[in-house]
Image (cartoon, rainbow, N blue to C red):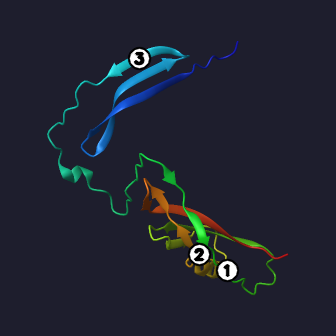
């Protein structure tokens, strides 16, 4: 005998601004196309303000961007080709680098995340630091994003 999996989904709507957040005030949930739950929040009331110390970000934490509009991806607009080192014995190599694409389109804080490859790492880092991007945007405003790029060294 087979297992039946039901189709469950919920729709959230009638959003209201509450402080600096948007909160759905109406909910409708369906199971297999049949209504199962309908709820409406009549009033949203703030409790006494909690201690602000409870919301201090941890050291090294980045604020998450909650974009309610359309997010447009960044685009590499200036790619500098890395200089191939004189490692004649190595035909092909790849270097993976994690970095932040800033709101200025520049690559910030690049770090090698692939296993060390002394013949190619420095050349890849130097090239990636010169790359320029059209930044990602959230509601038309440039945003900083973390990314990972792979720099390939190929010899025919």
Quick one: label 3 or label 1, which is nearer the N terminus? 3
The image shows residue 130, relative to residue 33, as above or below, that is: below
Residue linked to disc 3: 37
Classify residue 106 as left or right of residue 37.
right
Q: CA distance from mark 3 to mark 1?
A: 58 Å
Quick one: label 2 or label 3, which is nearer the N terminus? 3
| Element class at badge 3 | strand
The image shows residue 156, relative to residue 61, as above or below, that is: below
Q: CA distance from mark 1 to mark 2?
A: 8 Å
- Which residue: 44% across, 57% down? 140
Q: Exactly how many numbered labels are in the figure?
A: 3
Considering every residue shown, the one lying at the far bottom of the view is: 86
Q: Quadrant of the C terminus?
A: bottom right
| Element class at badge 2 | helix
Q: Residues within 10 Å of mark 2 (few under 14, many from 20)?
A: many
Q: CA distance from mark 2 to mark 3?
A: 52 Å
Residue linked to disc 2: 128
Q: Where's residue 134, x and y in %?
A: 53, 67
Q: Where's residue 38, x and y in %?
A: 38, 18
Classify residue 86 as left or right of residue 129.
right
Considering every residue shown, the one lying at the far right of the view is: 156
């Amino acid at each position: 005998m087979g297992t039946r999996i039901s189709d469950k989904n919920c729709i959230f709507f009638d959003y209201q601004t509450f402080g600096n957040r948007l909160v759905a005030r109406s909910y409708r949930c369906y199971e297999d196309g049949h209504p199962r739950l309908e709820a409406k929040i009549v009033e949203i009331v703030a409790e006494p303000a909690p201690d602000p110390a409870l919301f201090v970000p941890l050291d090294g934490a980045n604020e998450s961007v909650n974009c309610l509009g359309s997010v447009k991806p960044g685009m590499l607009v200036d790619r500098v080709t890395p200089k191939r080192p004189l490692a004649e014995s190595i035909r092909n190599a790849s270097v993976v680098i994690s970095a932040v694409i800033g709101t200025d389109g520049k690559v910030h804080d690049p770090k090698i995340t692939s296993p060390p490859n002394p013949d190619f790492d420095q050349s890849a880092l130097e090239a990636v630091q010169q790359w320029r991007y059209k930044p990602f945007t959230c509601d038309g405003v440039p945003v900083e994003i973390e990314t990972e790029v792979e720099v390939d060294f190929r010899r025919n």
